[in-house]
Image (cartoon, rainbow, N blue to C red):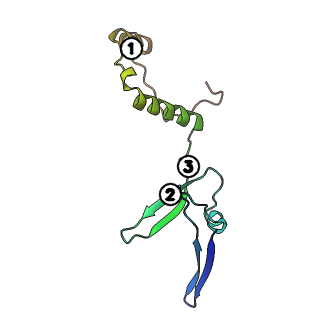
Amino acid sequence: MSKTTLLKDADMPATLEIDSTLTDRYQTTVPEPVRRALSLGKRDKIHYMIQPDGVVLMKRKEPLPDTDSVLESFLGFLARDMALHPQHIEALDAKLVHRIRALVGDMSVDLDAALPDDGE
């Protein structure tokens, strides 16, 4: 259950104070006025800023521009797998490195260059 209080001072804009309850599992529901103020939707992330005086500020964490959720999921999978099974990590074989160099030669790639309109 949450409690909402609206404070108004003649020289200040209205401040909305809202309480929520922490469960036994350290979870809480973000009250509806806060979700609305931060434009939060399901699965959105929240960023917290803890100030030295103990005040905690929160805001909606904006997704990184040009992120690819499939690639992020795959990279997350790789990171977890490497952490769980470091014994599977091996150095590249010298023969494979030689073969890769033979295939790409002195090719240089500009990763920031725009792709052609036809996508190739």
State which quadrant residue 84 falls in: top left
Which residue is farthest front? 24
Pick the residue in front: 54 or 91. Answer: 54
Residue behind mark 2: 47
Pick the residue in front: 96 or 1. Answer: 1
Which amino acid type corresponds to the residue marked 1 in the rendered image? Arg
Q: Earlier in the sequence, mark 2 or mark 1?
A: 2
How far is mark 2 from mark 1, CA to CA?
44 Å
Q: Earlier in the sequence, mark 1 or mark 3?
A: 3
Label placed on residue 63: 3
Q: Quadrant of the N terminus?
A: bottom right
State which quadrant residue 101 falls in: top left
Q: Earlier in the sequence, mark 3 or mark 2?
A: 2
The residue at the point 61 percent across, 79 percent down is 5
Q: Quick check: 57 left or right of 86? A: right
The residue at the point 54 percent across, 56 percent down is 46
Which amino acid type corresponds to the residue marked 2 in the rendered image? His
Could you say where residue 2 lies in the image, as x and y percent from the top left?
63, 70
How far is mark 3 from mark 2, CA to CA?
11 Å
Label placed on residue 101: 1
Could you say where residue 49 lies in the image, as x and y percent from the top left?
44, 62
